[in-house]
Image: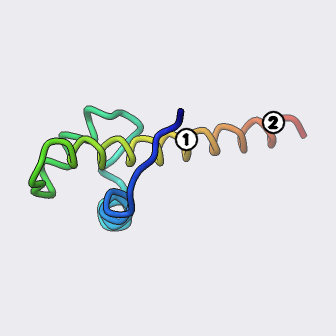
Amino acid sequence: MGKIYDSRVKGVARMLLLKYGNLFSDDFYANKQALRKIAVFQSKKLLNRVAGYITSVKSSEVGKQQEEVVEVGEE
């Protein structure tokens, strides 16, 4: 069973990634700390979900970059 994020989580995360994309990484706990510094969340659950979604987006970006490096190295 995969992770399913609602539109509120995705919307907030995408907005924050556009504005503060360089502050986030593929580490969940570091992303939570960054979110606490730049935004105020009404609930801990929402904070964790946004941090988790940002983590998954960033980790998929890292994976895509590594695939590109491998493809270039094969040529």
Q: Residue at x 47, y 48 (%)?
A: 57
The front one of 75 and 27 is 27
First-in-chain label (1 vs 2): 1
**Callout 1, which amino acid?**
Val
Quarter of the image for the C terminus: give it.
top right
**Callout 2, which amino acid?**
Gly
Kindly indicate whether the residue at mark 2 contacts the one at mark 1 (C-beta within 8 angstroms): no
Q: Residue at x 53, y 32 (%)?
A: 1
Q: Position of residue 48 (x, y in %)?
A: 25, 41
Residue 8 against residue 24 in the figure, above or below = below
Q: Which mark is residue 73?
A: 2
**Mark 2 element type:** helix
Q: How is the image coloured?
A: rainbow
Q: Which mark is residue 53?
A: none
Which of the two marks, 1 or 2, is nearer to us in this view?
1
Q: Quadrant of residue 62?
A: top right
Residue 5 shown left or right of residue 35 in the figure = right
Q: Position of residue 41 (x, y in %)?
A: 12, 54
Q: Which residue carries the number 1 mark?
A: 62
The front one of 1 and 40 is 1
